[in-house]
Image: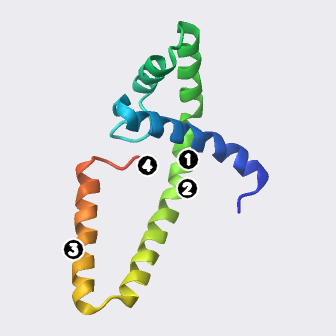
Amino acid sequence: MLPPLAWKQVLPALLIGLLIGGIGSHGGGRVMRRGGGPDPDRVVALFSRKLNLDADQRTRLREVLETNKKKMEALRADVHPKFEALQKSMSADIRAFLRPDQIEKFEKLEQEMAARRARRGPERHP
């Protein structure tokens, strides 16, 4: 569990991510850059359209995105290795109860999923 101060840093990033992901998945278009993180221009355009933001609100939104950009990048850099380690551990746990014929299919499925991720472009984290 994260200490209270860490939650104050993680929660805003999580909420922004959920908001961007939620709005983006409902016809809002792609808001993430290929190189990682939200594209400020697309986020501002999306929020402007969905929330009817005025010029001052658009400026303030852009400032929030730019101010928190480094924090988001640091959070991704911290979480990504932990996420990969968990994925590898889960894969090993799954292999442990599969039959040999299933392991072969499972490995193929993992390769297909990796190829799909590769086609989406660079990861959204460093």
In the rendered image, which residue does mark 2 sit on? 78
Residue 67, x across and y down, in percent: 59, 29
In the rendered image, which residue does mark 3 sit on? 108
* In contact (CB < 8 Å): disc 4 and disc 1: no
Tag 2: amino acid: Asp
Q: Secondary structure at mark 1?
A: helix
Closer to viewer: mark 4 or mark 3:
3
In the rendered image, which residue does mark 1 sit on? 74
Tag 1: amino acid: Ala
Q: Secondary structure at mark 3?
A: helix
* In contact (CB < 8 Å): disc 2 and disc 1: yes
Tag 3: amino acid: Lys
Above or below residue 56? Residue 70 is: below
Question: Quick one: label 1, few (<14), some, or many (20+) residues within 10 Å?
Answer: few
Alpha carbon separation for disc pair 3 and 2: 29 Å
Name the N-terminal-most of marks 3 and 2: 2
Name the N-terminal-most of marks 2 and 4: 2
